[in-house]
Image (cartoon, grey):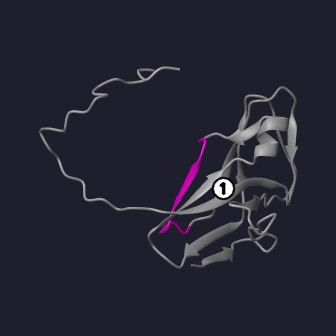
Amino acid sequence: MKLLFKKLHDKAILPQRATAQSAGADLCACLDAPVTILPGETVMIPLGLTCQPSEPDVVLLIFPRSGLSSKHGITLANAVGVVDSDYRGEWMVPLHHIGTEPFTIEYGMRVAQLVVMPVLFPEIIETDTVDETARGEGGFGSSGV
């Protein structure tokens, strides 16, 4: 499988894995000027890229970078970004600041990571019944802490 990336801006940076076995490829900010994110604020950060996977049955998932989240409180506003295999617009990441001090994003900074996973396309069928299970309707917390 291949990911065909198109640079929408000359200075966009193609995703790269930090190590050969990294599950995620780092995504870098494509900015003309630094952007400071205040605590509690969400800012859309452009990546200057779009992508075409060589296979249609994948989903491109964008996750926060653990170091930015744990050390600086910078995470994704939508927890995990979902890029459908047929989307061709510019990729953006909504960074949300849950920390206490302003944090500045600069051009080229690794702001998120891309993980590619297979996806199933099930047929959706309406029914009047579903099988009974031992759990039944037990919801949040029903199986203990």
**Above or below for 76 versus 84:** above
Is 3 or 87 nearer to us in this picture?
3
Apparent side of residue 65 relative to residue 50 in the rendered image (left or right): right
Q: Residue most toward the front? A: 134
Apparent side of residue 116 relative to residue 107 in the rendered image (left or right): left
**Above or below for 60 versus 93:** below
Q: Quadrant of residue 68?
A: top right
| Residue at the image position 65 percent from the left and 75 percent from the top | 5
Residue under label 1, please give it.
Answer: 92
**Above or below for 25 versus 75:** below
Q: Position of residue 84 (x, y in %)?
A: 49, 62
Q: Quadrant of residue 137?
A: top left
| Residue at the image position 85 percent from the left and 56 percent from the top | 109
Give the residues in magenta. Answer: 78-88
| Pointer 1 local density, CA inside 10 Å: few below 14, some 14–19, many at least 20 | some
Name the amino acid type tagged 1. Answer: Met
Image quadrant for the N terminus?
bottom right
Query: Does dot 1 land on a helix, a strand or a loop?
Result: strand
| Residue at the image position 74 percent from the left and 30 percent from the top | 98
Q: Position of residue 124 (x, y in %)?
A: 24, 54
| Residue at the image position 87 percent from the left and 50 percent from the top | 34
